[in-house]
Image: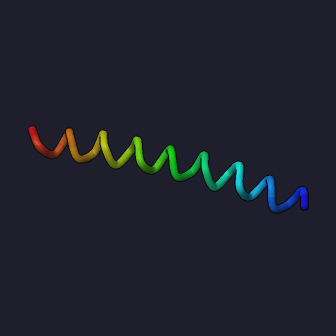
């Protein structure tokens, strides 16, 4: 169960990081 929670935590963190990076990349390309 601990492994599942750990994966969920890192999964959410990674998704947030990727989403932020993609937004930054898209806004940078638009200019």
* Residue 30 image offset from top left, x and y in percent: 11, 43
Is 22 on the left or on the right of 15, as rendered? left
The residue sitting at 23% across, 47% down in the picture is 26
Q: Quadrant of the C terminus?
A: top left
Q: How was the colour assigned to the protein in this rendering?
A: rainbow
Tell whether 18 sits left or right of 31.
Answer: right
Examine the rendered structure and indicate whether residue 17 appears above or below residue 4: above
Q: Nearest the camera: 5 or 28?
A: 5
Q: Position of residue 21 (x, y in %)?
A: 39, 44
Name which quarter of the figure residue 24 lies in.
top left
Extreme residue toward the right, this view: 1
**Is 6 positioned to the left or the right of 13 in the image?**
right
Query: In this figure, what is the number of numbered marks?
Result: 0
Residue, x 20% and y 39% (percent of image)? Answer: 28
Image spot of residue 11 (x, y percent): 63, 55
x, y percentage for residue 4?
Answer: 81, 61
Rendered residue at 90%/56% (across/down)? 2
> As rendered, which of 8 and 22 lies closer to the eye?
8
Q: Residue furthest left?
A: 31
Q: Where's the N terminus, which quadrant?
A: bottom right
């Amino acid at each position: 169960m601990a492994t599942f929670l750990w994966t969920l935590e890192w999964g959410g963190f990674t998704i947030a990081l990727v989403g932020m990076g993609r937004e930054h990349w898209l806004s940078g390309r638009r200019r």
